[in-house]
Amino acid sequence: MPVSYTIFPNRDLVVVHYEGFVGLDETMVSIDTYARDPDFRPDQKFLFDLSRVTGHETDFLRFFQMQGQLVEVYGQTGHDQLFGLYAPTGPAKAMANLGYQSWESVPAIVMLIHHDEAEVLRFLGQPETRIADLFASIEAER
């Protein structure tokens, strides 16, 4: 599946992985699944790993409608929420820029696009310098 997520409740962090060609239908299914996950919290920090994206659906009207629905759910925490986007490639940067544009008017969302793993992890308050190391650290904590 092009979209998957892992919740790290002890770190109040969600890592969302995108891979291949990303469509809106798969994205909405993943978001719906996440919203029903027992570890879901509306104010979690997000790391969007776009490093394996090869392209994304470009139905802009549908995309912005989807984002509008997401703002109603995730943009209502009452305090700043961090969204770090790891986008090291051209297709990843294109997808990240589209996401950034759709959230930039929501004051509670602090979203930054990063081209370096260490930078995005630092932005989200994580001590690791690579996403793979984050997963290894969490596994070691269990």
Image (cartoon, grey):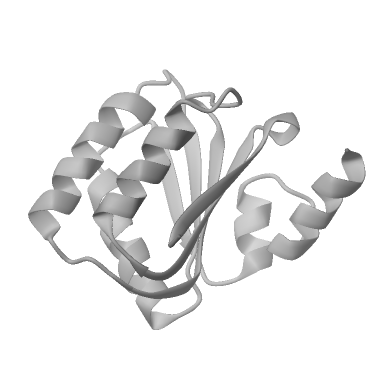
Image quarter of residue 103: top left
- Residue 64: x and y in percent read 16, 48
Task: Look at the image and tell me in which quarter the C terminus lies.
Answer: top right
Kindly give the residue lying farthest to the front in the view shown: 1
- Residue 85: x and y in percent read 48, 58
Can I make out residue 13 in this image? yes
Q: Residue at x 61, y 26 (%)?
A: 39
Asked whether 57 or 90 is in front, the reply is 57
- Horizontal arrangement in the rendering, residue 142 relative to residue 3 (left or right): right
- Is residue 50 positioned above or below 74 on the image? below
Asked whether 30 or 88 is in front, the reply is 30
- Residue 11: x and y in percent read 72, 35
Q: Residue at x 45, y 60 (%)?
A: 1
Q: Residue at x 43, y 42 (%)?
A: 110
- Residue 128: x and y in percent read 78, 57
Asked whether 50 or 107 is in front, the reply is 50
Kindly give the residue lying farthest to the top in the view shown: 78
- Is residue 90 positioned above or below 117 on the image? below
Image quarter of residue 106: top left
Asked whether 38 or 66 is in front, the reply is 38
- Horizontal arrangement in the rendering, residue 97 relative to residue 64 (left or right): right
Can I make out residue 104 in this image? no
Image quarter of residue 89: bottom left
- Horizontal arrangement in the rendering, residue 45 relative to residue 106 (left or right): right
Q: Residue at x 51, y 76 (%)?
A: 88
